[in-house]
Amino acid sequence: MDKKNIDWSNIGFGYMQTDKRYVSFFQDGAWDEGVLTEDANVVLNECAGVLQYAQTIFEGLKAYTTENGHIVAFRPDLNAERMESSAKRLEMPVFPRERFVDAVTQVVEANAAYVPPYGSGATLYIRPYMFGFNSVIGVKPADVYQFRIFCTPVGPYFKGGVKPLTIRVSDFDRAAPHGTGNIKAGLNYAMSLHAIVTAHQEGFDENMYLDPGTRTKVEETGGANFLFVTRDGKVVTPKSDSILPSITRRSLLHVAKEYLGLEVEEREVYLEEVKDFAECGLCGTAAVISPVGKIVDHDREICLPSGMTQMGPVTKKLYDTLTGIQMGRIQAPEGWIHVIQ
């Protein structure tokens, strides 16, 4: 299939409507067979559950063109697993894992012309999501749900590539204790919007959120997990019940241990120890890893030894190895790469 006439190297991280998307309804206790459609619009009643009580969850993953020309998706089974956890937490029906992966496959196949070519720096971002569809006026779960997947070609999440970011310690919390911080619900991201807008207005790239209970421990940003490197080369990531379990972080820890032979530790990370780390990065589907050069805690600046010009050496090895796996340049662990074409 011929590719669309798009300037792949210069597209941003934004929405571009593609040809097909997947839609399935849950009604009377069961999902229908699902269908691919050209209609990109969702028509809702004014009293739909998603509009009244924010009953919506989503996922994000990518498809790539590998070095040998195949179109693949990266670990979609883990996105299906995480969406199942999200659905259960918000009293929504579970979309079966095997159907989730099949729907992802259908959408990518139907939009293969929009999968950026190898070496362009762009990817196809895939957005599965589910929401309460029928009218709900009392506070309760909906009875009818719609599961959809659309995709869009995207460039780098952060403009300027891998230039280290400057982030601030936020005065806001992204999640409540014993709340929904560990699931991918739309309401979590709505809570972070004011914080990210004000951060940008003040010249910062992102926020560092602390634990909502004591506000002494590092949690995550609005859309990515933290990854730290100690001065002796150990990879450390924060552990908390209110952190979203990132598939990218999980993959990077495996890469660090099994491919690079590094010591790996998931534990509580206190804000006061951040000054002692050698490197810091934000990891997630959109950016893989974005290096952090400076963290501003009100009137205190924490400057990472890795600096403000490039990725630190360990972060760079992690990034290069994981992207090499995704793009087919490095042998992947069994089950990580889902071949679509």
Image: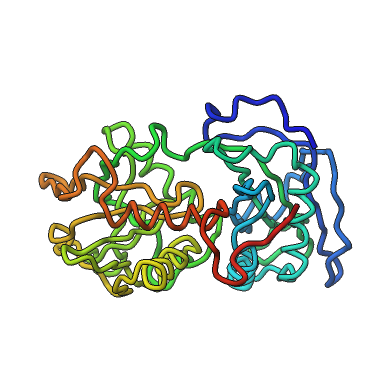
Colour scheme of the picture: rainbow
Residue 229 or residue 324, whichever sits in front: 324
Residue 221 or residue 315, whichever sits in front: 315
User: Quick check: 309 left or right of 88?
Assistant: left
Q: How many marks?
A: 0
Vertical comparison of 320 with 83: above or below: above
Where residue 171 sits in the image (x, y, percent)?
A: 26, 51
Quadrant showing the N terminus: top right
Vertical comparison of 268 with 277: above or below: below
Where residue 328 sits in the image (x, y, percent)?
A: 57, 54
Where residue 61 sits in the image (x, y, percent)?
A: 59, 54
- Residue 104 occupies quadrant: bottom right
The residue that appears at 88% across and 62% down in the rendered structure is 33
Vertical comparison of 75 with 341: above or below: below
Residue 142 or residue 35, whichever sits in front: 35
The residue that appears at 77% across and 62% down in the rendered structure is 102
User: Quick check: 214 left or right of 36?
Assistant: left
The residue that appears at 29% across and 46% down in the rendered structure is 311
Residue 337 or residue 124, whichever sits in front: 337
Where residue 15 sits in the image (x, y, percent)?
A: 62, 35
